[in-house]
Image: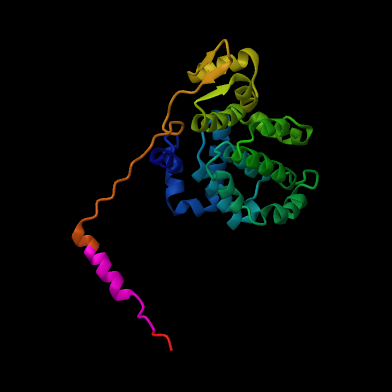
Amino acid sequence: MATTAAKWVAPPTRPPLIETLVSGVDRYNPSNVGILEDYLYHQIRSQEYDCLANLAILKLYQFNPDLYNPDVVINILIKALTSAPFPDFSLCISLLDERPASATSTAAAANPDEPDPLPQLLPVLTQLHGLLQQCRFPRFWALYRSAAVEPLRDNYTVECVGFEDAVRDVAVRAVKAAFTSISRERLGSYLDLSGTELNAYIEKLGWTIDASTGVVSVPPNPDNQIESTVVQENIQLPQLTKIIAHAAQTSLPVVPAV
């Protein structure tokens, strides 16, 4: 957990320039927003992720409404989506405030032929995030493949390299934490994979399949191993005497009945 927190604060892939911007007062300098936005699109293309840098963009938009770019916000939310079960998506949402509503008029005035897509896509992204948080992976894939999510798929996630595999990583983390074995069909519904693709994915994970039963064995890890823990209290007599004496001093006096 400590390692995960350290990577969240300072990902090993973060360039020195971005580290300087994120760690100092320059993160509030609106002239640096272009650098941070370029770094976001680098994350989109390279399967890297830096939540702290992306939050800095949203904070700059919050302080400087004229900088608001809905495409950037949507891409930030897409990257945060695959961080589940961590709260990155909620952190991003908390920085939007009334931005979708207030920025719509500004964006419409500047580009009357290009309405702000965020108000339409935000409920969809929020619903997808909720399904991932609840580990309802088959429902997630059904919604993601539906016509309602077509604008998000065709215009945004298609550009996010490795998005679907990142979602599968979320499912794998949940399976590793909850199962020691799982049926091949059930795992396939979680990963939206079947046939040879599913077999190849399971092999890549290093998991094994029982050919006769179709059961996939999940290797032991600290989360899926139940171990009893014995807690032994060692209270010395002088300590017990102090406790009893303190209780006697602080107890309320008995009021005699009238």
Q: Is 238 positioned to the left or the right of 98 in the image?
A: left
**Relative to 68, 242 lies left or right:** left
Range drawn in magenta: 241-255
Please state the horizontal and vertical placement of residue 148, each as a whole percent of the image.
77, 36
Q: Is residue 200 magenta?
A: no
Task: Report the residue at 75% width, 45% height from top.
Answer: 120
The residue at 53%/49% (across/down) is: 56
Q: Position of residue 70 (x, y in %)?
A: 67, 45
Image location of residue 7, percent across then percent down: 43, 38
175 sits left or right of 243 in the view: right
- Determine the main secondary structure of the stretch shown in magenta: helix
Residue 137 picture location, percent across and down: 64, 32
Q: Which of 23 and 188 lies nearest the eye of the viewer?
A: 188
Q: In the picture, which quadrant includes the C terminus?
A: bottom left
Q: Quadrant of the N terminus?
A: top left
Q: Quadrant of residue 82?
A: top right
Residue lying farthest to the left in this orientation: 238
In this image, 48 relative to 149: left or right?
A: left
